[in-house]
Amino acid sequence: MISRFIPALLASLLFMPIAHAAEPAVLNPTSTAWVMTSIVFVMIMFIPGLALFYGGMIRSKNILSICTQFFAFAGIVGLLWIFFVYSMIVDATGMAEGTWNFSSFVGGFDKALMKGITDQTLMGEIPEYVTSVFGMTFAMITPAIVVGGFVERVKFSAIVIFAILWTTFVYAPMAHMVWGGPGSVMHNLGALDFAGGTAVHINAGVAALVGAILVGKRKGWKSQSLAPHNLVFTFIGAGLLWAGWFGFNVGSALAANNSAGLILINTQIAACGGIVGWMIVEKFLDTHVSSLGLASGAIAGLVGITPAAAYVGVFGAAAIGLITGIGCFYAVTRLKHIINIDDSLDVFALHGIGGMLGCILTGIFASPTLGGNIAGLQFGSQFLAQVISIVITVIYSGVLSWVIFKLIEKTVGLRVSHEQEEQGLDISDHNERAYN
């Protein structure tokens, strides 16, 4: 018996280290190339996509101000990102599964100035420099979404200070709460948010609403025409946003795999559902189907699917698109006038309400019984987790954004003079004209 046991024991000791050795991280060229491509998609989604979408809806005397603000955001946020914002989002020091502490809400500064990262450092199977730049594009576009709530009346100096403070104190902590990993707020809650329903859309929508309230209504709102000056620009911008959203959502898989294929079709179908949902209700209630309405419906569907894209099936994506399209129609055409707030480009109605609907619906359609892929999902507990994630986002973004706007108001001031507003920000802030 001993003669049989000793060889078996030696074999087990010999091969045990091999069986338990960690596989070294290996770069995946295909996934790396896809994420690099997604970065380009999201940058096109930002500039010129969002710039044209917003620019076409405002008056011609202010279109360059939007373009200038967006390029300023890109520069400011890009530098803040490498200085400390990236570290505030991804640094997991002190975090542990199910543990609640300060690190659950915001990361530290261990990766400030990209410390410890080289061209050999991998995040999963992708160079960390690549995943970092991908995250940077999200940080750039989110404050740009916010300014749509109070365009045509805010000083450029105020916009610059807003970009610095809001990115640091609102976006970075919210992004960490969502994507910080085990021990972060949303992870501990069990809330589902794949690509930023809370951190991007609800966060931006609430901040835009707060800004619109504190800045005040545009001169002539409801008493004179403030019609879009070029809906073709808006249509082109909406198309670029739709195309760029594939980078935004599918790129968030950080891989070229089966999950990416599901996210791709879900993103496409949700946009289609948003268009159809808006079109049906607009025709039924307002008799005419508008071009701006269909563009807005596509954006509503895309916002709705953002938190759900990896978790629901195609049926769920279609349902989310239809429901968010209808819900955002009511928010844009009815709710805005009930609350009597001049959210200039309906940021809260599209991104805030659309993000809330998307987050709640994610918790429903992620169930395998409805075609989703979250095994063992319990409707009651998941619904509660989704609602709590929305409440946390609304309170955090609302309070901190209010403080930031008030601080700016007390220092450099928020709003241009009535004369400058009448003249247009292109001239008063930048001494340029879009059309000569």
Image (cartoon, rainbow, N blue to C red):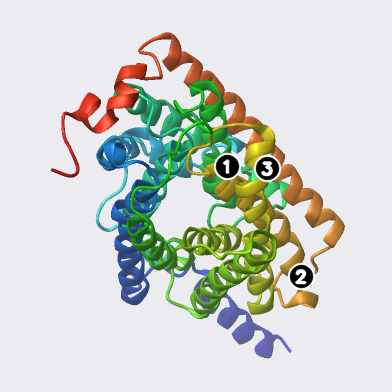
The three-letter code of the residue at mark 1 reads: Phe
Q: Nearer the viewer, residue 325 or 102?
A: 325
Q: Nearer the viewer, residue 192 or 6?
A: 192
Q: Which of the 4 image quarters holds residue 103?
A: top right
The residue at 63%/79% (across/down) is 9
Task: Give the image location of residue 345, x and y in percent.
Answer: 48, 43
Task: Give the image location of residue 164, x and y in percent.
Answer: 37, 28
Which comes before the other along the chain, label 1 or label 3?
3
Which comes before the other along the chain, label 2 or label 3?
3
Q: Are marks 2 and 3 in contact (CB under 8 Å)?
A: no
- Disc 2 element: loop
The residue at 59%/41% (across/down) is 95
Q: Residues within 10 Å of mark 2 (few under 14, many from 20)?
A: many
Q: Is 95 placed above or below 30 here?
A: above
The three-letter code of the residue at mark 3 reads: Leu
Q: Which of the 4 image quarters holds residue 436?
A: top left
Q: Nearer the viewer, residue 319 or 276?
A: 276
- Disc 1 element: helix
Q: Are marks 1 and 3 in contact (CB under 8 Å)?
A: no
Q: CA distance from mark 1 to mark 3?
A: 10 Å
- Disc 3 element: helix
Q: Comparing marks 2 and 3, which lies closer to the viewer?
A: 3
Q: Comparing marks 1 and 3, which lies closer to the viewer?
A: 3
State the residue position of label 1: 348
In the picture, which quadrant includes the N terminus? Answer: bottom right
The three-letter code of the residue at mark 2 reads: Ser
The residue at 57%/80% (across/down) is 10
**Residue found at the very far left of the displayed protein:** 436
Q: CA distance from mark 1 to mark 2?
A: 28 Å
Q: Is 201 placed above or below 293 here?
A: above
Residue 367 badge = 2
State the residue position of label 3: 335
